[in-house]
Amino acid sequence: MIDISIIILNYKQKGFVMSCLKSIAEADFSGIKKEIIVVDNNSDDAIGEILAWQNPEVKFIQNNGNLGMGAGNNVGIQKANGKYIVIMNPDTIAFHDTFKKIFDYMEINQKVGVVGPRQLNPDKTIQDSCYRWHGVLTPLYRRTPLGNFQFAKKDLERFLMKDFNHDYAREVDWLLGSFLFCRKSFLEKVGYFDERYFMYFEDTDLCRRFWNSGFSVVYNPEVEIIHNHNRESAQIEWYKFFTYQPARRHIISWVKYLLKWGMSSEIN
């Protein structure tokens, strides 16, 4: 019986993948059986050959095209045998106790569907990684000068949970999808990532389905990872927001999310 299936989706980030795998190899898995699955979204970077040579224990799956974040990870989930599924971005680094702590937490808290760790920047400052539900205009407030208005700042502070002490564990609306530790039996009930989203909002959507099925979503800062996070769609001038490809994908996913869940998406 496999306890943890770790799924890493690669798209032209083989250097990050190798660093991520190194951190996993150095982590504590005492008493825990794991498998590692690397799925490649047609990167054409020879990562399969590199893994076969350097990490032969890793299960490698080659997709024939770039399926996007949700669909790519779903390929790995379908092949996973673990009691728990870990969705782990290539640009994340685990600490020695990351998996042991989060596994023990889930074993004790049987009604939790998914838990996320505190995510740190490489300089060890805290990243935003747990959120309240979006308001209809929250993405625009985050990406354009509208965010400078007081009404927008208020919404962003709510969304980013600025009133919450991030040193304490608590239930949250949704978690950043760069590291999600999911109970597979619950995941199979709520469904895998919605493949209508190529990129962005698939993590929000999944957490909402966990909540709607009665399974809690928890932020646990006693568990930590490093996340070399590059908010790609936010690294451009605001006036290019509608023409830059990652930003366009963000907009498309945002619209799909609103159409799926309704224009008034806040429930807490």
Image (cartoon, helix red, strand yellow):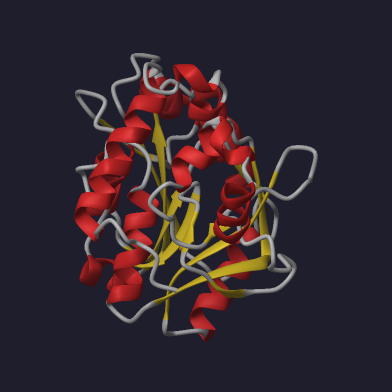
Q: In the displayed structure, does residue 194 sit left or right of residue 141?
A: left
Q: Position of residue 33 (x, y in %)?
A: 46, 64
Quarter holding the C terminus?
A: bottom left
In front here: 153 or 179? 153
- In the displayed structure, 217 sits above or below 77; it is below
Where does the image place residue 263, in percent across and percent down from the top left? 28, 56
Please give the name of the residue rendered at 19% of the width and 24% of the height, measured from the top-left corner: 64
The quarter holding residue 242 reads top left
* Horizontal side of residue 94 vs 172, given as left or right: right
260 versus 20 height, above or below? below
Q: Position of residue 192 (x, y in %)?
A: 25, 57
Q: Is residue 26 shown above or below 145?
A: below
Left or right: residue 43 compared with residue 91: left
Task: Find residue 59 and report its horizontal and vertical position in percent.
Answer: 35, 41
Residue at the farthest front position: 150
**In the rendered image, which quarter contains the N terminus?**
bottom left
Residue nearest the observer in this picture, 131 or 207: 131
Seen at 62% across and 42% down, the residue is 149
Q: Is residue 80 above or below residue 239?
A: below
Picture residue at 35% right of the left edge, 19% below the top: 43
Residue 72 in sight in this render: no
Task: Report the front residue among 219 and 255.
Answer: 255
Residue 188 visible, this orientation: yes
Q: What is the count of numbered marks?
A: 0
Along the line of sight, the residue nearer the viewer: 118 or 42: 118
